[in-house]
Amino acid sequence: MNRRQFIGLVGGAVAASPLAAHAQSSTMPVIGFLNPSSPGANANRLRAFRQGLKETGYVEGENVAIEFRWAEGQFDRLPTLAAELVRRPVGLIVAFAGASSAAKAATTVIPVVFAVGEDPVAQGLVASLARPGGNLTGINFFNQELVGKRLELLRELVPGSVRVAVLVNPTEVTSTETTVREVGKAALSIGLQVRVLSASTSHEIDAAFATLAQERPDALFVGGDTLFNSRRVQLALLAMRHAIPAVYAQREYAEAGGLISYGTNLADAFRQVGVYAGRILKGAKPADLPVVQSSKFELVINAQTARTLDLTVPPSLLARADDVIE
């Protein structure tokens, strides 16, 4: 294995060692990568992020270094991890989901490129989408705006459903509040009853499904949460074990055995973050780069899971699907 391959592998799996990063800093820019989840849950997205960098002329280990910080689902660690990157210091921070607010709080000087599912203006990350102002810009991948559509798709797939459970992670306060509010509005309009359950750890996910096994709702709506995405195999297996039809926010859930997903193509969002990071490294100012709103949405159906749950997928739904997993 040559030196370049070694550097690439280390950067993709864990945070680069402080000594290696220090050695690189004198010859190449360093990007701080702040994520509330884990490397294993983001392998495809990391490839997409690196592809975006490559499109602007940057290749990790050749002319740019990446300093990784993963919260592993422990959101209270994000401010500390963001402060570490600022002290490092890095030339740029890319921050995802709940890590974006931590990055904003940590620095008013270092450029920050974010990817968030909620409105970044409402979150206080930028002044406006067209002219962000300050040191932040990024991608809005429309997680919460699609909540109502996901519930409608679940009802279409399970037409006899009346009672729907909603699983949220209370540690992501903004996301949870928005999900509960939007699900409630959508449920009211189509005549569904909603029961909200909370989980912020793997053990609590198990406990939530134990409750579902007792209450037997007709379907389950899983909130678009970074913790849940990192536990997507657990969620898909539990939903299958308890024969609960469930809808999710990203295609990775359906690939892991989940019934149906609808949401932004997050790999493309990560690629766009890489493109913006590259442009800023070349001298662009975050204040002058408008927030990009994702336009690629995917409906993915796991037909094998549907058959296991004894569900017939309506032809109209199959025709609209971007991918059907057999």
Image: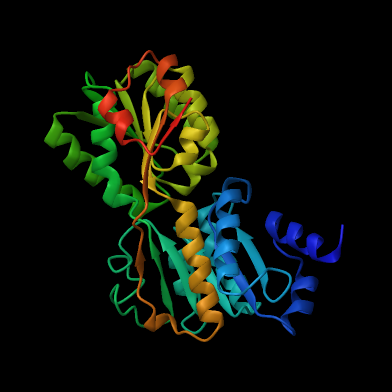
User: Splitting the image into 4 quarters, where does residue 159 fall?
Assistant: top left
Locate residue 129, reporting x and y percent: 30, 72
Quadrant where the N terminus is found in the figure: bottom right
* Residue 261 visible, this angle: yes
Asked whether residue 204 is in view, the answer is no
Residue 323 is drawn in which quadrant?
Answer: top left
Residue at 55 percent across and 83 percent down: it is: 282
Q: How is the image coloured?
A: rainbow
Q: Is residue 127 above or below residue 225?
A: below
Q: Does residue 166 appear to the left or right of 24 in the view shown? A: left
For this rendering, which residue is in front, 280 or 25? 280
Q: What residue is drawn where x is 29% and y is 69%?
A: 121
Q: Position of residue 89 (x, y in %)?
A: 64, 80
Residue at 35% x, 51% y is 143
Q: Is residue 47 above or below residue 311?
A: below
Q: Position of residue 149 (x, y in %)?
A: 25, 41
Residue at the limit of the structure toward the front, as seen here: 319
Q: Is residue 301 above or below residue 8?
A: above
Q: Nearer the viewer, residue 67 or 302?
A: 302
The residue lying furthest to the right in this view is: 1
Q: How many marks?
A: 0
Image location of residue 31, percent across then percent down: 61, 73
Q: Give the side of residue 234 with respect to residue 153, left or right.
A: right
